[in-house]
Amino acid sequence: MDDNGQLTPRQETILGLTVREYVRSASPVSSRALVDRYGLPVSSATVRSELAYLEETGHLTHPHTSAGRVPTHEGYRYFVERLLGEVELPLRERLTIVHQFHQARHNMEQWMPLAASTLAQAARGAAVVTAPQSDEARYKHLQLISTRGVGVLLVMVLQNGMVKQRMLTLAEPLTQRQLTEASERLNHLCAGCTAGEIEKELEAGESGLSEFEVDVARIVAEILRRVDARSAGPIYSDGLSEVLQQPEFSEGEQAQQIVRVMEERSFLRTVMHEALSPDIGNVRVLVGGEGEWDQLRTCSLVLARYGVTDFSTGALGVVGPTRMLYGRAISAVRFVAEVLSELVEETYALERPEVEETEPSKAD
């Protein structure tokens, strides 16, 4: 191994085969098994020497009760980063997944459970999926519409396509022209802003808005705050029962650990938030918690973000033992993320907003 941590080609071949064989058999891998099963053009003694070296470098470990080796977290990381290569799901599976989502494309409520079940089946692990949402709700535009007397309907559109409505009661009537002019000034001031940015602008006292318009801006910020408070949403999951059948989880303690991971939604949400960048489609593999999350020391996670950058995004991933089919898991996560991203883009392009009626407010 050189100074950059790069193994020799032969060492990489033996490490890669050891990982693949251990994933396949769930049993420690011996030099004889590698030579016999994969027809290596070297002797068992040579392979045994390389296995011993890979153990010294921390890529393999040697269970006390066995003559074979098993990969360490470092060995799995090296395999995923340098040896795995590009892997795609078989065409038939990809077409099946696309067809399933095509049937549900107009019903966002079906996307998440469908994504969880599809991903769990394709990756042969436990799947977790969050719904698409903006990091913070952002204002797009509003309209103030005169109804009768001192009543005004506020219709606000967020950047993610969501629509909020609020009935306002004025201290004195305003004409529709006055309301339209107020809407235009608010749209100019608030376009693309979060609740905090609108509040900061109002606190500065230099917005140039009338008293009525300031009151409306405060109501807008309040609505955005409420959207943010609700935005966490549920985490959808599937496939845990299949994962618990893996040999690693035959012992009660390890089984309880992965069950706790899957049930602690706030923890999963934190891992997804901290492990994933805002970039869409980039797959992140966490082996044994990467030294950051002790709860994941017996697990691996394959995660990706989907959606439309700076608009509306969600996250999805696969949880399983470190002895995971990494190629299949990565390709499944990447492909389902691509399908969901296309659905999000298509849905918001077609502007199918969610309209929510809210309680009346008073704007003095």
Image: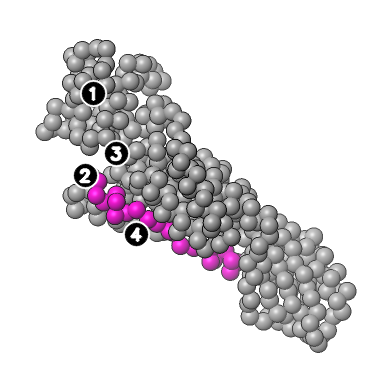
Give the number of the mark in front: 1 or 4.
1
Q: Residue at x 32, y 54 (%)?
A: 240
The numbered disc on residue 37 is: 1
For this view, does 350 lie left or right of residue 343? Answer: right
Q: Circle 4 is placed at which residue position?
A: 263
In terms of depth relative to the viewer, which is nearer, 9 or 60? 9
Splitting the image into 4 quarters, where does residue 6 fall?
top left
Q: Which residues are magenta?
A: 225-246
Splitting the image into 4 quarters, where does residue 324 fall?
top left
How far from the left and from the top, in percent, is residue 170? 77, 83
Q: Are marks 3 and 2 in contact (CB under 8 Å)?
A: no
Tag 2 secondary structure: helix
Q: Does residue 197 appear in the picture of this structure?
A: no
> Label 2: how many residues lie within 10 Å, few (<14), some (14-19) or many (20+)?
few
Give the number of the mark in front: 4 or 2.
2
How far from the left and from the top, in percent, is residue 309? 61, 47
Spatial separation of the CA atoms under disc 3 and disc 2? 10 Å
Q: Circle 3 is placed at which residue position?
A: 323
N-terminal of the pair, mark 3 or mark 2, is 2
N-terminal of the pair, mark 3 or mark 1, is 1
Q: Are marks 3 and 1 in contact (CB under 8 Å)?
A: no
